[in-house]
Image (cartoon, rainbow, N blue to C red):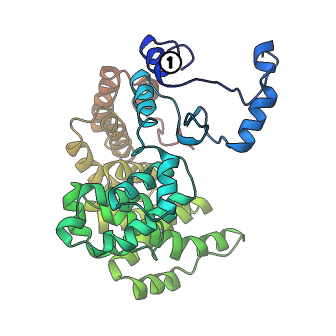
Amino acid sequence: MEKEVYTNDSVGQFLNANFISVKFQLDSSQNDDDVIKRTYREAAEFNQKYPVVFFPTFFFFSPEGNIVHKEIGYKDVGQFISISKEALDTAKQYFTLLKKYELGNMDFRTMVYLANKANSFKDTIAKNIAKNCIDNYLTDMIPNTLFTKENIEFLRAFTTSSKDNGFKIFFLHSRKIDSLMKEALYSESIVGYIISKEEIDPYVISASKTVSDAPDWEHIKSIIKNKYNEYYTDRTVMPAKIRWFAYRREWSQLTKNTVAMVKKYGSTISNWDLNDYGMSVLLFSNNKNEINEAINWMTKVVKMESDSSNLLPASLDTYANLLYKSGRKSEAIKIENRALNMAVTFNISNFIEDFKGVLEKMKRGQPTWLRNQ
């Protein structure tokens, strides 16, 4: 910003017309000149009064010296002028709005704006404002008013616990929300994450502290089934088991549970994850049935990802390696050549070198699945 933004004529004209600008450097180095060194004390005092967590941070004050607004992070010329205009607008000034909120004088939409702004700053008050919005406004809305993209995105940003009202909304209205957001499993990803965090992770963390213990998966499943439903029981426990076996390096259990999960939930698993699961089978399984199952789901992935410049080459590589490991060498070489050609077309340099090495090993009849172990 020093070279591209602060020196820009449009920025200079707007700031000089509306503000007196002062810059503090809060750290120090041996390269600091005398001008910067003379501001060390003032910078430290300023930081004590107005703590800075992110760099850069921009504070805006009224002519009377009262703080009214702030912003954080790199801004280009247009963005910097925009936030400077916000600092002149009492309806947008962050600290002005905080005072209004504390006085209980704020409408719902302004409260949403303030909560999002506070959240972007990682200010702890963000959760309190959001909880007020959700508990006292959103949950009382009629469905046609509640289910808007803006409201759902707001709920997602501030739903972190099964005790939150947002969790109940995502749990009970998943299909409606997924349709609105045009994203399959939008709600499930939120609900599943929270269930895993609350009902599975404590047991996994406890078991990980010992050498021999393992989580009591049946006990965990019974808890989730009783609190929620059977669908979320397996949908959260099966991925947790896969993560556990990877952590414990129990490869046969890892691949066995991976194949079982894809069989049951393959249609709801992203192609990125299916590719990762296929790679796990490639690296860690010698079971022909498991390898063939992985080939089956990777066949579907490469067909679905015909226009993907990043996932398709990676998926083709995984698919080719699985074919090669199953003994289908000529098919594997053909597919790996296709992966290499795509990597060259899209100039994915790390793929190019990797795929060339794989092809050479395939042609020489050497194992390719040991390269990442």
**What's the residue at 47%, 57% (across, down)?**
100
- Residue 110 position in % (x across, y down): 37, 54
Residue 283 showing in the rendered view: no
Q: Nearer the viewer, residue 100 or 274?
A: 100
Identified at 32% across, 64% down, the residue is 187
Q: Quadrant of residue 173?
A: bottom left
Q: Position of residue 318 (x, y in %)?
A: 37, 42
Q: For this view, does 70 lie left or right of residue 346?
A: right
Res. 147 image quadrant: bottom left
Disc 1 marks a residue whose amino acid type is: Asn
The relative height of residue 343 versus residue 106 in the rendered view (above or below) is: above
Tell which residue pokes out farthest to the front in this image.
64
Q: How many C-alpha atoms fall within 10 Å of the one at disc 1: few (<14), some, or many (≥20)? A: few
Residue 54 makes an appearance in the image: yes
Front residue of 194/94: it is 94
Q: Is residue 183 above or below residue 308?
A: below
Q: How many marks?
A: 1
In the image, taking residue 26 as reference, residue 100 lies left or right, namely: left
**Front-most of residues 197 and 240:** 197
Q: What residue sits 41% from the left and 15% below the top?
A: 10
Residue 190: x %, y % from top left: 39, 64
At 24% from the left and 41% from the top, the residue drawn is 305
Quarter occupied by the C terminus: top right
Tell me the SS state at disc 1. helix
The spot of residue 176 in percent (x, y) is 20, 67
Quickly name the residue at label 1: 16
